[in-house]
Structures are given as structure tokens and as C-alpha cells.
Image (cartoon, rainbow, N blue to C red):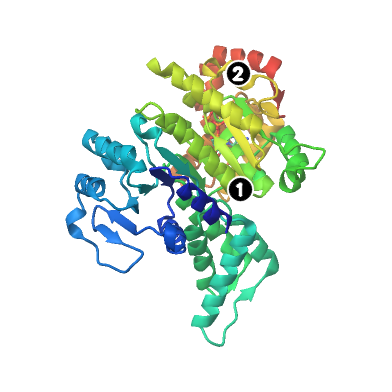
């Protein structure tokens, strides 16, 4: 296998420290053992494994762990003192790199490598090496399984299932098999096998009903930082009144998004920015986009990526974006993007870099990740974000006009099991001039309570009475909405 050959070359390169960042520890151990054990006599080296719980253990010949070397500085002193060459795999040593004594001991071992070649392989999910050791170190990246390898894993797990259940064959829907192999992309060997096992062992079959579970489990495995959220309840576009142009724009791009390949004339759609008045359906439209494109939706919590440790913030963003790339095809929803990008006190430098990193990712991404960002406060929206070409389009979501208000009434009355034919929708539309969709919904809810208190069924009059009691935001915040509209008229496309 290629990654094994690459690792072999790194191990042969006579670098005193090799770092492997991975969550697939057992596979790394397997690979290193098979490389070292397979060496010819002259090159043969003893192989050890260390953990803080078990201490040192010889791997190439079967020996019990030696508990007395479990202390990190004990084991380093021991390795420094041995006079024979060897390979030492240190599992999860990363927390102990903060201790200056350990750093010096490591440096001693490295400096004397020419005399006694003791090679240290550090395997952890993440290793920050102190700068003084950098020049002694090589990093090895584990490659993730290719499509062919993933297919082999699925077939091997199926065969294993059949072995354990004599007389059964795993039911194989070829289309679902193809989708499964595609959806397992981006995971380690161990995780691929685990998810394939879940999918096959629940019912002895590979069918399309396994796919949502696989996507959910995959997302759980990838989203270690908790910054992305898998949204279960996506909306349908029929849940939204108005936004006709946005709906049309998306449905024209649906096929391009699903089927585009590298040699197409049209680029894969990148995403849209929805700017508009509060409560008019931006968040709802973001969720419905996933419905129209027929893909899962991930919500990126932009304000959660900020970390008090300098540097971690950028890493958080990078990891979240690469998780989205791995989950593709999907919608990446960034709600209220301006909140995550507004200058955060003394951290404007970080915010600037975060914005830069995000825009670079948007510009360079080839993956089928369709970004839907929403914003309602234009005063804190960085100008770079609304520059032409960042998003495919910037839409303005305005207060609903009369016809749209009628359809919003239709939708929300039906949601509360009311027959819209029993209401005078024209009258309702007139009574709610200047209302947002959210306010219309609220008026229906309040009117239902009022009707219930009178032990009557809901009527047009109940709703009209409630709407007269409401002062919509468009009245309360008139200036702001006027300013927003005039800003939008130059920079955005109306949704209706
Ligand atoms: N056009 C619409 N059609 C149907 N329902 C709507 C519409 N606009 C708003 N609503 C109702 O109002 C609720 C709130 O709307 P939503 O959260 O999508 O607005 P928003 O534009 O994201 O507001 P904010 O700027 O406050 O985040 C929705 O869940 C929905 O029930
Ligand atoms: Mg919203």
C-alpha cells in the first residue's frame, strides 16, 4: 500500500523524531510493526511502544509491558541511556512536551542520534513540537482510504457478516453501495470500517435507508470541536411565502450543483448571501436551500470558532471548513455572519485573518459545499464580503408585499390546522401592511389564544384585531429599514 511505502521512506530517512498526527492509532501501529518486522537482518531494529498507562513494551517480540517506565521523564532517561539502536513509538506523549526537562531529554536523544540511532515516533491526534526540536523532526501524514480501498473495506465487512451468519448473504443494492462508498470518503480506515459495520450489521443489507445514519455518524466523528451543527429539520420551499426569485435561482442551479464535474462549462455554484429585514425568512430560506438541492445541511457557528488561545481560532475555522469539504455534497449555513466577523474588541487582527481565510476557502474550493450566509446588520458587515464575485449572488429579503403576505397567511393557517378558505386573505393582507413573516405568524398565534379564550373558532376578525394591537418592527425601526433598503438597492438582487 502507498502510505505504508511512504512511511517506510520516512522511517529510513534517519530523522530522530517522526510525528504522526492521527486518530487511527491502531492502523499506525500495524503499519510500523509490519515495516520494522519486515526489515532484513542488517537493518533490523527492536521496536517498542510506550503509553503513560503501560510504560514500555517490546512489540517485535512478545514481551509484557514494563510498568516501571511509565513516567514520561523516566522513559526518556531510559531511552537516552540505552546503547543500542531502536524504534520507540510514544503514544499520546503530546501533553508532556510542555515540560522543559522532557524537551531537553528529547534534544539529548536527538543530538546523539548519529552515535546511537534511537528513533522516536510520536503518535497523537495533535502534536505541537517545541521550536528547539523542529530541526530534528519529520512529520508523516496518514493518507485516507481511496474509493477503491473503501469499496474493499465494505466488501470485507460484508463477507465477515456472511461468515458470522451462516446461510445469509448481504443484500446489495448497487446504487446504495456506490453511495455508501462515496459517503465514507474523508474518514480514517478505522472509522470507515466502523461505519460500514454499523450500516451492514443492523439489517444484513446495504440499502439507501442506511445512508442518513452513515452521514450522521460521520459528522459526529468529524466534528470534534463542536463548531458545526448537523441540522435535522430542514425546511421545504413550500413552507416559505414569497422569495420567488431566490427559489427560481436555486432550482436553475440544482442540477449544476448535483452533477457538475471538473470538465464542465459551468462552475459548481458556490453560494449566496441573504441580507434583509429581521423575521422575513432568511434563516428559513437557508434551511430550505438544503431541501431544494437535496443535500444535508451543516450550520457553522461563526462566533464559536473564537478561542482564547491565539492560533486556535484559525485552526478551528480550518478544521470546520475541511469537515464541510469532507461532508460534501452539503449546504454550509452561516447564520448572522456579521456577528462572527464584526471587530471583536481587541481582536480585530484575528477577525481580519478569519475573514481572509474564509474568503480564500470560498474562492478556491472545488468541493460541492454550497454556502448560504445570512445577515441583517449591514453596518457591521465587512465590505470585502459583499464585493462582487465572493458569492454567486447577494439577495435582499424585504418585507413581504401584499400577495406574499396572503401566501404567508395561507402557510401558517394551514400549519395550525385552519382552513384558509374560511378567511378573508385580502383583508388580512391589508391589516398587516409592514409586517414581517415572523410577525404574521405571531399574530395568528395570539389570535388563536384570543379565540380559544372566547371558546370560539378562529376568524378573520380575531386576526385583524390582533394585528391592530401590534406595532411591527418596520414602524418601530423605520429609519433602519429605510437605510437598509437604500443600501441594498445598489448592491443586491431582490428576492421577490
Ligand atoms: N416568507 C415567510 N414565509 C413563511 N414564514 C415566514 C416567512 N418569513 C418568516 N416566517 C416565519 O417567521 C419565522 C422566523 O423567520 P426567520 O428566522 O427565517 O427570519 P430571519 O429573516 O432569519 O430573521 P432574523 O433576521 O431575525 O434572523 C420563520 O420560522 C417562519 O415561521
Ligand atoms: Mg435568522
Query: What is the residue that sits farthest to the bottom in this orientation?
Result: 167
Front of the two marks 2 and 1: 2
- SS of the residue at dot 1? helix
The quarter of the image that holds ligand 1 is top right
172 in relation to 54, above or below? below
Mark 2 packing: few (<14 Cα in 10 Å), some, or many (20+)? few
Q: Position of residue 480 (x, y in %)?
A: 55, 14
Is residue 463 something that shows in the picture?
no
Q: Do the CB atoms of the residues marked 2 and 1 lie less than 8 Å apart?
A: no
| Mark 2 C-beta closer than 8 Å to ligand 1 | no
Question: Disc 2 designates what residue?
Answer: 384
Disc 2 or 1, which lies upstream in sequence? 2
Mark 1 packing: few (<14 Cα in 10 Å), some, or many (20+)? few
Q: Residue at x 52, y 76 (%)?
A: 160
Q: Position of residue 87 (x, y in %)?
A: 36, 53
Left or right of 155, for residue 189: left
Question: Disc 1 designates what residue?
Answer: 414
Q: Quadrant of residue 200?
A: bottom right
State which quarter of the image contains the N terminus. Answer: bottom right
Amino acid at each position: 500500500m502507498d502510505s505504508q511505502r511512504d512511511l517506510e521512506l520516512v522511517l529510513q530517512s534517519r530523522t530522530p523524531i517522526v510525528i504522526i498526527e492521527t486518530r487511527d492509532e491502531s492502523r499506525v501501529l500495524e503499519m510500523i510493526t509490519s515495516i520494522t518486522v519486515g526489515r532484513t537482518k542488517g537493518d533490523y531494529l527492536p521496536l517498542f511502544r510506550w503509553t503513560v498507562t503501560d510504560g514500555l513494551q517490546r512489540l517485535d517480540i512478545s514481551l509484557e509491558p514494563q510498568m516501571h517506565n511509565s513516567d514520561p521523564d523516566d522513559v526518556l532517561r531510559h531511552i537516552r541511556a540505552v546503547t543500542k539502536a531502536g524504534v520507540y513509538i510514544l503514544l499520546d506523549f503530546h501533553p508532556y512536551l510542555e515540560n522543559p526537562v522532557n524537551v531537553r531529554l528529547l534534544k539529548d536523544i536527538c543530538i546523539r542520534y548519529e552515535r546511537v540511532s534511537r528513533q522516536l515516533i510520536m503518535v497523537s491526534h495533535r502534536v505541537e513540537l517545541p521550536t528547539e526540536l523542529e530541526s530534528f523532526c519529520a512529520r508523516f501524514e496518514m493518507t485516507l482510504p481511496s474509493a477503491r480501498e473503501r469499496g474493499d473495506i465494505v466488501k470485507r465487512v460484508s463477507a465477515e457478516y456472511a461468515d458470522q451468519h451462516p446461510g445469509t448473504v448481504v443484500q446489495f443494492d448497487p446504487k446504495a453501495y456506490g453511495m455508501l462508498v462515496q459517503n465514507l470518503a474523508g474518514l480514517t480506515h478505522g472509522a470507515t470500517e466502523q461505519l460500514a459495520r454499523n450500516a451492514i450489521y443492523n439489517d444484513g443489507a446495504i440499502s439507501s435507508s442506511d445512508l442518513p445514519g452513515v452521514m450522521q455518524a460521520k459528522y459526529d466523528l468529524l466534528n470534534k470541536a463542536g463548531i458545526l451543527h448537523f441540522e435535522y429539520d430542514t425546511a421545504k420551499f413550500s413552507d416559505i411565502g414569497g422569495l420567488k426569485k431566490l427559489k427560481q435561482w436555486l432550482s436553475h442551479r440544482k442540477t449544476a450543483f448535483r452533477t457538475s464535474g471538473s470538465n464542465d462549462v459551468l462552475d459548481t455554484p458556490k453560494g449566496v448571501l441573504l441580507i434583509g429585514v429581521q423575521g422575513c425568512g432568511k434563516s428559513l430560506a437557508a434551511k430550505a436551500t438544503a431541501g431544494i438541492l437535496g443535500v444535508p445541511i451543516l450550520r457553522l457557528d461563526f462566533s464559536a470558532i473564537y478561542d482564547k488561545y491565539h492560533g486556535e481560532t484559525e485552526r478551528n475555522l480550518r478544521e470546520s471548513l475541511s469537515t464541510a469539504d469532507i461532508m460534501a455534497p452539503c449546504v454550509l449555513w452561516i447564520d448572522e455572519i456579521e456577528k462572527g466577523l464584526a471587530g471583536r474588541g481587541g481582536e480585530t487582527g484575528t477577525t481580519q485573518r478569519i475573514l481572509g481565510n474564509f474568503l480564500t476557502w470560498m474562492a478556491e474550493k472545488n468541493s460541492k459545499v454550497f454556502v448560504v450566509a445570512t445577515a441583517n446588520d449591514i453596518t457591521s458587515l465587512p465590505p470585502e464580503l459583499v464585493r462582487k464575485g465572493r458569492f454567486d449572488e447577494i439577495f435582499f429579503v424585504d418585507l413581504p408585499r401584499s400577495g406574499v403576505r396572503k401566501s404567508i397567511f395561507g402557510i401558517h393557517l394551514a400549519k395550525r390546522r385552519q382552513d384558509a378558505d374560511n378567511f378573508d386573505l385580502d383583508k388580512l393582507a391589508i391589516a398587516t401592511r409592514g409586517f414581517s413573516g415572523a410577525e404574521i405568524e405571531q399574530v395568528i398565534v395570539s389570535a388563536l389564544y384570543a379565540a380559544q379564550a372566547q371558546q370560539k373558532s378562529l376568524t378573520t376578525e380575531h386576526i385583524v384585531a390582533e394585528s391592530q394591537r401590534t406595532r411591527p418592527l418596520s414602524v418601530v425601526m423605520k429609519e433602519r429599514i429605510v437605510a437598509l433598503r437604500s443600501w441594498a438597492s445598489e448592491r443586491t438582487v431582490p428576492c421577490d
